[in-house]
Image: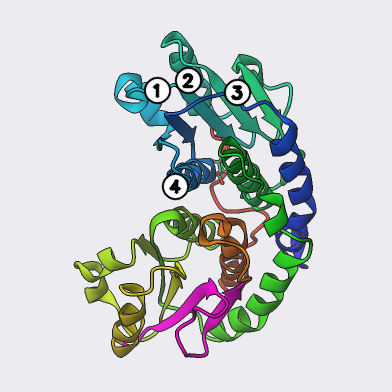
Amino acid sequence: MGDGRVRQLISIQEQRWSEALHSARVEPLSLSPPLLFVGCGSSYYLAQAAASVARGLGITASAAAAGDVWSDPTASLLGAKGVIVISRSGTTSEALLAIDVIRTCGVPVHVLTCNADTALAAAADYATVLNADDDTVVMIQSFTTMLMWLQAWLMRMQGRDAAPFFRPGLAAEVLGAAEPLVKDLLETIPRRTVYLGAGVRFAIAQEGALKALEMGGAPVLWYEPLEFRHGPWGLIDEGDVVWLLRLGDRTEGEVPLIADIEARGARVVEIVRVGQEYPRHDVIRLPQNVPDLLAGPLAVIPLQLYAWTLAVALGRDPDHPRNLTKVVRIG
Ligand code: F1P
């Protein structure tokens, strides 16, 4: 099978980031808050991540699945003065249906996509087109590159610049740290993988889980870390892997959880900023100078690699996920 395109994209995605940072710096700040971010699949997780980053910066924002906007625009919009519709393809049915109903409601729309000359881009008041389509079914570089743009655009709204946090080579460092650990974790195929992430990291936890589902059809769960205690962790057993995407600045609730999950037999891997890790060996460290709020594009990389490696171990071809298409079209 060889390493294939998805594995290659995991390594090279960083090449697209500087262009995204530049674009967010020069393109018009077309909308004003309250903002609503909209998408489907990975793009819905991007919408959630962006809304979280926005709120972290003090910008009123929410996120909705495009299908929900289509079926109930009034409840989804609820006072939004600007909508950002995110879609790699620019041709997903629900995204097109959502933009139609948003326009009927008279709310301005900015589209973020990786494909120009699409119906979605044409329907927008303003479209940002990033050269980051993956040419694969699953979203890899499009996810991190569009997230980079969203973060930088939101920072700029607050008069700040995200670019200085992302010197070239950071993604390669995180990937390099993840490689031996992921190999070790998958010496034996886990019974189940759980993804835990709080606040701004919850969307990344969901994206990690989606990657393992799409490429490997693997059993996965995802929760807010402290929610995991409220029922779901009853299923934890030996042979489970738990990824904990820690927020370095909010350790009180998350650190005791690690010991409690391990006491139940699972292996915990934390992704956390340097200097804020729990003293144990299964850790992937994110650069200290990247704030929690902006670390999503880096934090997702170990999860992409894990999902790809797991899929291969399960005998699947990550470049051709079963039963999936690159674009979902209704009817
Ligand atoms: C994104 C998406 C992906 C998924 C699949 C179908 O849609 O739902 O998340 O992996 O490939 O497309 P979009 O961003 O193109 O609207």
In terms of sequence position, does the residue under pointer 2 or pointer 4 come before the other?
4
Q: Which residue sits at x=62%, y=27%?
A: 29
Kind of residue at disc 4: Ser
Q: Which residue sits at x=59%, y=45%?
A: 151
Q: For disc 3, does the CB lie below 8 Å from ligand 1?
A: no
Q: Nearer the viewer, mark 2 or mark 4?
A: 4
Dot 4 falls on a residue whose secondary structure is helix
Residue 48 x, y percent position in the rendering: 45, 44
* Location of mark 4 (residue): 52
Q: Nearer the viewer, mark 2 or mark 3?
A: 3
Residue interval drawn in magenta: 265-286
Residue 306 x, y percent position in the rendering: 58, 70
Crowding near the residue tagged with mark 4, few <14, some 14–19, many ≥20 C-alpha atoms within 10 Å: many
Query: Depth check: 102 or 93 in front?
Result: 102
In terms of sequence position, does the residue under pointer 2 or pointer 3 come before the other?
3
Q: Is residue 230 visible?
A: yes
Q: CA distance from mark 1 to mark 3?
A: 22 Å
Q: Which residue sits at x=52%, y=73%?
A: 271
* Location of mark 2 (residue): 97
